[in-house]
């Protein structure tokens, strides 16, 4: 949606249209958790967001301020409720592209595509941060956040290499059920973050749009020398069963104490998620035995 002819307008281009804002939007609805996290990192509180309970379970930080309205599921938000909130900006991801026209009739809608065929989510969330900084008159804060993230990742990588100069590659695993694992690879925020830290990913297989591969559990046996990091799993019982199985116990990484459990972090998030993940790696890999 265009607001043509407005003085001092800031054009923002995205996948479908360009939106011009003569003044920074104040009533923002964010459907995707990555955009919600990014807004909060710029000290902007949305009036509405999708799936608040899921955010509290998976994203956790930044903590949600009071006064935000839950507008429904991320894949099917409540359009009537969104309209009632009278937003002046709606932020969505490409997963809601089909609803763009309906949302854009309610308020100017911008679609940010963090996960795409370019497979560069860290670069994309940097772009997201800078674009939102421009729209919301938070340019300085956005630039500072991007610069701080880049510096932090480099320094954290240096800390890990100082503690473990010959560190083996890292393998990031999510246990799905008794036969399936997800390995994080190219196109994941995790992969981009460790590369920015100067570390190596053990997994180089083909990945989906979100940057992970579905693999059979037996595949883990091909990566016994890696440092294995366990991501938060939905089915905790399946995770416990695998970790106590003869297969897992026989692996070299188990016998060499090279298995680490990561605290909950939304690994499809923004720059703050990348920072937290990087800090968690430092805590796990540099602590004294």
Image (cartoon, rainbow, N blue to C red):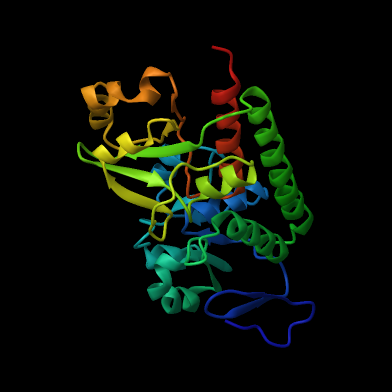
**As displayed, is residue 118 above or below residue 216?**
below
| Residue 237 x, y percent position in the rendering | 23, 28
Q: How many marks?
A: 0
**As displayed, is residue 203 above or below residue 169?**
below
The residue located at (64%, 56%) in the rendering is 126
> Which of the image's four quarters has the C terminus?
top right
| Residue 34 x, y percent position in the rendering | 52, 53
Residue placed most toward the observer, 109 or 156: 156
> Which of the image's four quarters has the N terminus?
bottom right
The residue located at (45%, 73%) in the rendering is 103
Q: Is residue 73 left or right of residue 19?
A: left
The residue located at (59%, 46%) in the rendering is 195
Q: In the image as oriented, which residue stretches furthest toward the top?
A: 289
Does any portion of residue 101 appear in the rendered image? yes
Picture quadrant where residue 203 is located: top left
Residue placed most toward the observer, 56 or 237: 237
Q: Is residue 126 left or right of residue 205?
A: right
Does any portion of residue 245 appear in the rendered image? no
| Residue 33 x, y percent position in the rendering | 48, 52
**As displayed, is residue 280 above or below residue 89?**
above
| Residue 27 x, y percent position in the rendering | 59, 61
Residue placed most toward the observer, 46 or 229: 229
Picture quadrant where residue 217 is located: top left
């Amino acid at each position: 949606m265009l607001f043509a002819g407005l003085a001092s307008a800031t054009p923002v281009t995205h996948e479908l249209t360009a939106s011009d804002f003569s003044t920074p939007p104040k009533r923002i609805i964010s459907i995707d958790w990555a955009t919600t996290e990014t807004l909060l990192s710029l000290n902007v509180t949305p009036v509405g967001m999708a799936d608040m309970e899921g955010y509290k379970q998976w994203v956790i930080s930044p903590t949600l301020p009071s006064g935000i309205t839950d507008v429904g599921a991320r894949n099917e938000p409540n359009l009537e409720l969104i309209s009632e909130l009278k937003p002046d900006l709606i932020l969505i991801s490409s997963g809601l592209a089909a609803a763009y026209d309906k949302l854009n009739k309610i308020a100017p809608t911008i679609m940010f595509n963090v996960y795409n065929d370019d497979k560069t989510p860290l670069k994309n969330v940097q772009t997201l941060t800078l674009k939102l900084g421009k729209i919301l008159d938070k340019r300085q804060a956005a630039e500072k956040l991007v610069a701080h993230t880049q510096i932090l990742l480099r320094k954290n990588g240096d800390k890990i290499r100082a503690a473990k100069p010959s560190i083996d590659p890292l393998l990031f695993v999510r246990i799905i059920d008794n036969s399936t694992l997800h390995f994080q690879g190219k196109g994941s925020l995790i992969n981009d973050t460790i590369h920015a830290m100067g570390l190596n990913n053990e997994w180089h297989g083909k990945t989906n749009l979100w940057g992970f591969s579905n693999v059979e559990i037996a595949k883990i046996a091909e990566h016994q020398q890696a440092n294995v990091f366990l991501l938060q799993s939905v089915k905790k019982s399946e995770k416990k069963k695998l970790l106590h199985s003869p297969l897992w116990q026989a692996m070299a990484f188990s016998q060499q104490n090279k298995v680490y459990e990561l605290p909950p972090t939304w690994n499809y998030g923004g720059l703050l998620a990348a920072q937290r993940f990087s800090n968690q790696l430092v805590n796990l890999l540099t602590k004294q035995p």
